[in-house]
Amino acid sequence: MDEPAIFVTGAAAGIGRATALLFAARGYHVGAYDLDEVGLERLAAEIKAAGGSVATGVLDVTDPAQWAARLAEFHSGTGRLDVLVNNAGVLRAGPFESIDIAAHRRIVAVNLDGVLAGTHAAFDYLRDTPGAQVVNLCSASAIYGQAELASYGATKAAVRNLTEALDLEWRRHDIRVLAVWPLFVATGMLDGVHTASTRSLGVRLTVDDVAAGIWDATRRRGLLPRVHYSIGAQAKLLAAAGKYAPGWVVRTANLIITRSR
């Protein structure tokens, strides 16, 4: 297959769906994977109606065997894997102690273990595709631990570290690994989420904003390597503060944003 190929998790809705639609419209063969079969069917119908190319499949990102099967199926039809987008994620918000430990562990399983399993399973296909890229969905909540998002932010901080490490390790294989960093995005994942930080900062990004950010990040292959891409003015400001401001300033800012005392 001559057209480039992208494999997107969590593709039935939200950021994953918007990313699949954008890349399909720009000439990519899209692999769209999720637990939501109905959502995948609707996505596939929309891509095909617009003249795009798509394959779909059910994928539980916490299951390494399913990762191996879906990637093998996708690669058998494409012969390549240009971009892997680790987008699937779950969120629970609230005081840490009020959330059942099973819910915390589910967040870790999907948001971190799912990225580990998928990226590991995809390595051979990425290595055999010149200029392949991995895009991990990070979050501005990983810049500094966010009250009411403790386990979610912890998983995204771990994904940040994994991204940086693999980008160093896999350069010799011509595989680029990068992270995109939105703040709060208007998706179903935020339905019913009312934290101090969402009230303070608002929900200003759309799924199309993030999809466009992913597209732009995967186009940028300059002489100076870049791993992190903040999406939106707020995330860029928080990222700059986290990088350059003294620790006590960052902590104080987060106290104000979350009204945590």
Image (cartoon, rainbow, N blue to C red):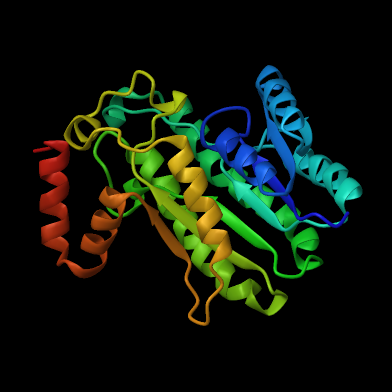
User: In the displayed structure, does residue 201 sit left or right of residue 16?
Assistant: left
Which residue: 33% across, 49% down? Answer: 232
Who is closer to the viewer here, 26 or 88? 26
Residue 88 in sight in this render: no
Question: In which quarter of the view is residue 92 placed?
Answer: top left
Most extreme residue toward the right is: 76
Question: In which quarter of the view is residue 158 placed?
Answer: bottom left
User: In the displayed structure, does residue 242 sit left or right of residue 217?
Assistant: left
Count of numbered circles on the image: 0
Residue 116 in sight in this render: yes
Image location of residue 117, percent across then percent down: 67, 48
Which residue: 76% across, 55% down? Answer: 4
Image location of residue 245, percent across then percent down: 16, 66
Image location of residue 256, percent across then percent down: 10, 43
Instruction: Tell me: residue 21, above or below residue 126.
Output: above
Which residue: 24% across, 56% down? Answer: 237
Image location of residue 131, percent across then percent down: 70, 69
Q: Quadrant of the C terminus?
A: top left
Instruction: Tell me: residue 213, above or below residue 240.
Output: above
Which residue: 28% across, 51% down? Answer: 233
User: In the displayed structure, does residue 12 sit left or right of residue 45?
Assistant: left
Most extreme residue toward the front is: 50
Q: Quadrant of the N terminus?
A: bottom right
Who is closer to the viewer here, 109 or 4? 4
